[in-house]
Image (spheres, rainbow, N blue to C red):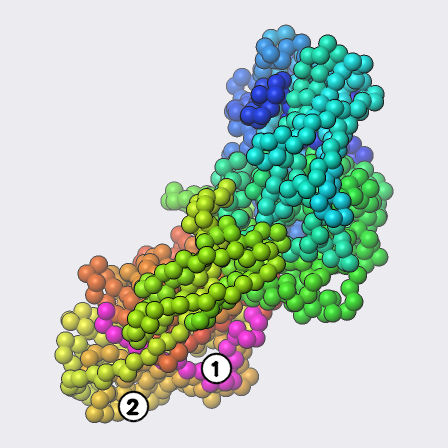
């Protein structure tokens, strides 16, 4: 490349679409290189690379007018400046304010500007200075600097001389420093601007930061250096013969007499083949033909190691390049996307790079945690929403096995969609020729860096930028440059005249019925949901409806959950307590508030209960069980099931009573049936039985330890016995106000005035703090708020707070005493609820709640009874669907099991408090204090739904953060026959599916029994 050392830096570039790279080294592959073969095989840090991460001198200015304009000058003294960490976001180092917005631009309502204008009076500037000395082993060699990520535009000077300028926050920018070096200490100066023309193209749904947020390093190159490497591993039509071509572009013309060799090793380290390279000018090629190569897939991520050795004309080894290679073929066959000849289904997630403390500054440790979590939960694909990730992420996807949609850094959402309506009158880039080059540069930078990663199957032209000729040209560039991959772009859904921009039909948050309609009307392209199941806090209900499509329609090829991790930042409240903050918590305005918390993983890298559902629905191995057999369905494309042990466990009332390991090996795409032979003695006693079948790793894998369960299935049944009648006598006292029922070591009191049960004492211990009452409301979830449930169904909140007891009936029988309370409600004259308490001589109380509906009312969020006990009763033991919380539309991944927790830990720490901690399919729930005293709740004819919380629904409803909840004084128990589902098709209007709702005009009832623990 030619460097223009005479160019003068200009602030005009910040708003000039034609200037986005000045003196920047052209984009190239991300390969590493070493001096010796031994170094290359170890593949640790490059000796020819010197990190500049660490502390830099730093000055922050609110706008360019306040910046120290001449700070780059060698004589300018920066010694008294603050220090800042690199990599880091300025806003998380105490400079400026983090701001979260989703679709609108961050200056909306503040600056009246249109593209490509930049609000210069509100454009934060970070001035960075780093002094360095060239390492001894890199002296007298070319010296370059690489910035792996800087947001959003920056200028570079060395020793007072201007070096270059770059935009595009998420791809590397490298500059040649050689001409500007001086002996001894060198002064590197970098000026970073938060906003530039690039900001119009970086309107992703994320926190708005700025600064040097990825690695910075110096590097040098040897006398003969491979500048760019393109590794093309191809398969023939039988997928049994491979060809490998390593095409190289050298930095300089290759001298006569130079030599290039290539050695290919398999995953075991055995030499497969060697070859010599062919040279021409600055290019070289090494080629191999490989018979029956081990193919790469997410199931079997087989990688070969290629070592390219460059020798100079004297025969001296000057450079060794280690490069991983994966043989795989991704193509469209009969309108279906296929990998190595097999239809692929993406069981994916969208992933932002994120860390709760450092924002988009993520470490290798973070990445390893993420990829192991994905593999452990059957996730096989990731979309890099909505920008290229760090190189290390792609290396891990190659190694661990994940399919990748690599998405270029483009989103201009605020330029064409306002308040949810499509209005593209000033959309960029659209058909505007002045935006073509700056957009294409982002595509080139991504493809050239990432092209050698087998995990990348699809290039994406960006996200939510409407459509137009600019994006069509990008799509065609991807196809022409790399025919081995397909091209994705969802935005053509809004502008079908640009349909050619995408090789597949991709939609966001399409309803299942709409997807089916597309698939059943002779579609031209396969369908993927590039975003679906919006996992905003307590969500992901109804996800099974999407995964059910996988086997029903060959052209439905899966989707990518939105999204992987909450984007919440750790912050301290006024009392110094750390909490996870969301949009608006930093007084950032405008803001989209809670909308940044949509993860199946919390921002502090803890699994959310939603992962239980994801893991089950994404299982490639299905286990169908009854009491006679297990059918193992292996839906893998390539891997058999021999890596797993099939373990069968029989449990009675949740306690293991029989376990058996079964030999099995089911080829990919097939199924096998295995008989179950459980000894009759195991099933002799009455009770609730379950058969659990689990596929467990026989040996440790990269992503999990031996014994890890990757798939499960369950069968449950009841073996009933006659319940003996309670014995003893009851003494009934009907007073003027109260009805007392007394037995051996217990007493029960009902109040005609309060209209409820007011006291339950076992062994002298009072268990009722506030009387049970019918409730129809739950603490609103974010999905509830999204379809305005408080507005459409708020009458049920009123009905839950106030009711009128119209009748109290006492019926004294020979074996039980019944007390019935009848209630009416102001919201509808015909609406009635009855609660019948039946007290038995052993102290058990059967509770039946009956709802008689009325017309013209909205659906009920729930129909339940709720009451409070002392917070001293805080230990929980369940026999229910679990172990994680689950709901009517999110319980496929739950299993009937016995588990323990506490009232404090039962709920889920969603970033905004809301309904959480509920379990469906409850057979019994035990609540006790430290002495083991307390109560048990048992289902009667049908399983019940229960929740135990330190707070009432109303207290939770009022809190926007956990620290706003009041001190704990009670344990709140809520029992229902059914609660509505949580929904999740989207979080801005999609209702819960009808089968998971409660109609208001029907009748509902449930029964449970309270017993002493």
Q: Say whether residue 1006 is magenta.
A: yes
Q: Secondary structure at mark 1?
A: loop
Magenta stretch bounds = 992-1013
Choose top left, top right, bottom left or bottom right for residue 66: top right
Residue 975 in the image: state x and y as whole percent. Answer: 37, 73
**Image position of 816 (left or right of 279):** left
Residue 925 in the image: state x and y as whole percent. Answer: 32, 68
Choose top left, top right, bottom left or bottom right for residue 896: bottom left
* Quadrant in which the C terminus is drawn: bottom left
Q: Secondary structure at mark 2?
A: strand
The residue indicated by pointer 2 is 809
The residue indicated by pointer 1 is 827
Residue drawn at 47 percent across, 85 percent down: 1003
Q: Which mark is residue 199?
A: none
User: CA separation, marks 1 and 2?
Assistant: 24 Å
Residue drawn at 57 percent across, 75 percent down: 994
* Quadrant in which the N terminus is drawn: top right
Q: Say whether residue 896 is magenta.
A: no
Residue drawn at 60 percent across, 8 percent down: 184
Crowdedness near tag 1: few (<14), some (14–19) or many (≥20) residues, C-alpha within 10 Å: some
Residue drawn at 61 percent across, 21 percent down: 37
**Image position of 719 (left or right of 931):** right
């Amino acid at each position: 490349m030619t460097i223009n050392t005479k160019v003068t830096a200009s602030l005009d570039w910040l708003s000039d679409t034609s200037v986005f790279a000045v003196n920047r080294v052209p984009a190239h592959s991300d390969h590493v290189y070493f001096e010796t073969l031994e170094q290359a095989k170890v593949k640790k840090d490059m000796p020819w690379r010197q990190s500049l991460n660490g502390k830099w001198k730093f000055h922050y200015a609110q706008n360019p007018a306040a910046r120290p304009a001449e700070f780059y000058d060698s004589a300018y003294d920066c010694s008294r400046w603050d220090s800042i960490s690199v990599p880091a976001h300025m806003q998380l180092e105490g400079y400026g304010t983090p701001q979260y917005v989703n679709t609108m631009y961050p200056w909306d309502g503040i600056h009246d500007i249109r593209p490509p204008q930049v609000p210069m009076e509100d454009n934060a500037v970070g001035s960075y200075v780093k002094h360095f000395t060239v390492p001894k082993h890199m002296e007298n060699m070319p010296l370059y600097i690489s910035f792996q990520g800087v947001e959003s535009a920056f200028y570079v000077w060395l020793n007072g001389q201007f070096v270059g300028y770059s935009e595009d926050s998420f791809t590397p920018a490298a500059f040649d420093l050689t001409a500007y070096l001086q002996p001894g200490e060198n002064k590197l100066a970098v000026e970073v601007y938060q906003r530039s023309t690039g900001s119009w193209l970086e309107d992703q749904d994320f926190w708005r930061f700025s600064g040097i947020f990825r690695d910075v390093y110096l590097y040098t190159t040897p006398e003969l250096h491979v500048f760019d490497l393109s590794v093309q591993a191809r398969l023939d039509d039988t997928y049994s013969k491979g060809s490998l071509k390593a095409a190289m572009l050298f930095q300089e013309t290759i001298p006569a007499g130079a030599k290039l060799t290539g050695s290919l090793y398999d995953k075991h380290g055995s030499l497969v083949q060697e070859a010599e390279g062919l040279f021409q000018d600055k290019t070289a090629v090494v080629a191999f033909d490989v018979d029956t190569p081990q193919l790469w897939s997410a199931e079997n991520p087989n990688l070969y190691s290629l070592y390219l050795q460059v020798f100079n004309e004297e025969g001296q080894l000057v450079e060794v390049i280690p490069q991983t290679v994966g043989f795989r073929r991704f193509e469209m066959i009969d309108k279906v996307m296929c990998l190595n000849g097999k239809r692929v289904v993406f069981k994916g997630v969208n992933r932002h790079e994120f860390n709760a403390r450092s924002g988009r500054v993520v470490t290798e440790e973070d990445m390893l945690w993420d990829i192991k979590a994905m593999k452990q939960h059957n996730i096989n694909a990731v979309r890099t929403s909505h920008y290229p990730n760090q190189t290390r992420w792609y290396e891990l996807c190659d190694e661990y096995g994940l399919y990748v949609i690599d998405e270029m850094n483009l989103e201009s959402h605020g330029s064409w969609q306002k308040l949810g309506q499509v209005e593209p009158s000033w959309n960029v880039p659209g058909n505007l020729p002045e935006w073509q080059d700056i957009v294409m540069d982002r595509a080139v930078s991504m493809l050239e860096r990432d092209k050698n990663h087998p995990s990348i199957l699809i290039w994406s032209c960006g996200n939510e930028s409407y459509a137009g000729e600019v994006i069509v040209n990008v799509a065609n560039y991807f196809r022409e440059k790399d025919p081995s991959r397909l091209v994705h772009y969802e935005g053509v859904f809004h502008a079908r005249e640009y349909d050619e921009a995408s090789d597949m039909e991709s939609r966001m948050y399409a309803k299942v019925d709409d997807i089916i309609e597309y698939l059943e009307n002779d579609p031209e392209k396969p369908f993927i949901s590039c975003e679906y199941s919006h996992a905003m806090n307590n969500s992901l209900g109804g996800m099974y409806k999407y995964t059910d499509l996988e086997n029903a329609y060959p052209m439905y090829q899966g989707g990518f959950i939105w999204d992987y991790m909450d984007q919440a930042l750790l912050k301290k409240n006024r009392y110094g307590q750390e909490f996870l903050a969301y949009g608006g918590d930093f007084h950032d305005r405008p803001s989209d508030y809670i909308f940044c918390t949509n993860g199946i993983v919390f921002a502090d890298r803890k699994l959310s209960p939603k992962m239980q559902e994801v893991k089950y629905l994404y299982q490639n191995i299905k286990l169908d069980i009854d009491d006679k057999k297990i059918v193992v369905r292996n839906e893998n494309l390539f891997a058999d099931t021999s890596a797993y042990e099939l373990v069968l466990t029989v449990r009675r009332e949740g306690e293991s009573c029989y376990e058996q390991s079964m030999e099995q090996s089911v080829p990919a795409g097939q199924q096998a049936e295995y008989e179950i032979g459980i000894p009759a003695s195991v099933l002799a006693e009455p009770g609730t039985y379950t058969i659990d079948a689990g596929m467990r790793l026989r040996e440790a894998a990269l992503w999990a330890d031996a014994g890890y369960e990757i798939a499960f299935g369950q069968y449950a049944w009841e073996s009933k016995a006659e319940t003996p009648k309670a014995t003893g006598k009851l003494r009934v006292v009907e007073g003027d106000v109260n009805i007392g029922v007394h037995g051996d070591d217990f007493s029960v009191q009902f109040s005609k005035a309060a209209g409820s049960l007011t006291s339950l004492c076992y062994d002298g211990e009072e268990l009722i703090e506030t009387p049970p009452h019918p409730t129809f409301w739950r603490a609103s979830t974010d999905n509830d708020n999204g379809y305005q449930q408080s507005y459409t169904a708020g009458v049920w909140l009123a009905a839950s707070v106030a009711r009128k007891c119209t009748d109290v009936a006492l019926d004294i029988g020979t074996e039980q005493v019944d007390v019935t309370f009848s209630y009416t409600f102001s919201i509808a004259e015909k609406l009635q609820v009855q609660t019948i308490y039946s007290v038995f001589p052993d102290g058990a109380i059967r509770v039946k709640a009956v709802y008689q509906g009325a017309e013209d009312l909205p659906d009920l969020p729930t129909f339940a009874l709720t009451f409070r006990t002392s917070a001293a009763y805080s230990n929980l033991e369940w026999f229910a669907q679990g172990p994680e919380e689950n709901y009517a539309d999110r319980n496929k991944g739950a299993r009937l099991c016995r588990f323990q927790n506490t009232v404090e830990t039962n709920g889920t720490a969603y970033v905004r408090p809301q309904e959480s901690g509920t379990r469906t399919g409850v057979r019994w729930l035990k609540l006790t204090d430290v002495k083991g005293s307390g109560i048990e709740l048992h289902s009667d004819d049908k399983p019940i739904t229960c929740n135990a919380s330190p707070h009432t629904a109303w207290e939770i409803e009022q809190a926007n953060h956990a620290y706003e909840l009041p001190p704990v004084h009670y344990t709140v128990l809520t029992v229902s026959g059914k609660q509505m589902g949580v929904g999740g098709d989207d979080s801005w209007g999609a209702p819960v599916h009808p089968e998971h709702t409660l109609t208001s005009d029907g009748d509902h009832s449930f029964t449970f029994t309270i017993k002493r623990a």
